[in-house]
Image (tube, grey):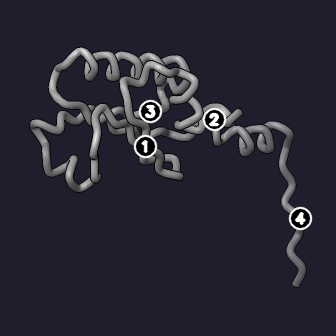
Amino acid sequence: MEDAPIKYTQEEFEESIGKSDEEKYILRLYITGITPKSTRAILNVRKICEENLKGRYELEVIDIYQQPLLAKDQQIIAAPTLIKKLPLPLRRLIGDMSDKERILVGLDLRPKK
């Protein structure tokens, strides 16, 4: 028995290829207390996410002073560190997240130049 070809309407096809634009991003930002660098990193990541992932991201901010075991489990050696857990591949970015272009590339929202 031969499989019949699958037929899509134009709308269904466009919807299926647009799914990558709807992927939910799971992000964790590891910080060290409420320092100027930590505050800057939080504000920068939130701004980038709101501009580029509005409604499609979950950001968890983790203070490694208050949750050292989480930092140890994730092998955090510097802070602030942003980890993109999903969509794969996993990515790690270190610093105050002020280089917007580097963050967008690191989150796979822009191609590497």
Circle 3 residue: 57
The first of marks 4 and 2 along the sequence is 4
The image quarter in which residue 81 lies: top left
Residue 25 position, x and y percent, is 47, 39
Amino acid, disc 2: Asp
Circle 2 residue: 21
Residue 80 position, x and y percent, is 30, 31
Q: Foreground residue, 108 or 51?
A: 108
| Residue at the image position 49 percent from the left and 32 percent from the top | 56
| Marks 3 and 2, how far apart at CA | 12 Å
| Marks 4 and 2, how far apart at CA | 26 Å
| Residue at the image position 33 percent from the left and 38 percent from the top | 28
Sort mark 1 into few (<14), some (14-19) or many (20+) by Cα contacts within 10 Å: some
| Residue at the image position 86 percent from the left and 74 percent from the top | 3
- Tag 3's secondary structure? strand
Front: mark 1 or 3:
1
The first of marks 3 and 4 along the sequence is 4
Q: Which mark is residue 62?
A: none
Q: Residue furthest bottom?
A: 1
Front: mark 2 or 1:
1
Q: Are marks 4 and 2 in contact (CB under 8 Å)?
A: no
Residue 44 position, x and y percent, is 40, 18
Q: Foreground residue, 37 or 52?
A: 37
| Marks 3 and 4, how far apart at CA | 36 Å
The first of marks 1 and 4 along the sequence is 4
- Tag 4's secondary structure? loop
Q: For the N terminus, which image quadrant?
A: bottom right
| Marks 2 and 1, how far apart at CA | 21 Å
Amino acid, disc 1: Arg
Circle 1 residue: 92
- Tag 2's secondary structure? helix
Circle 4 residue: 5
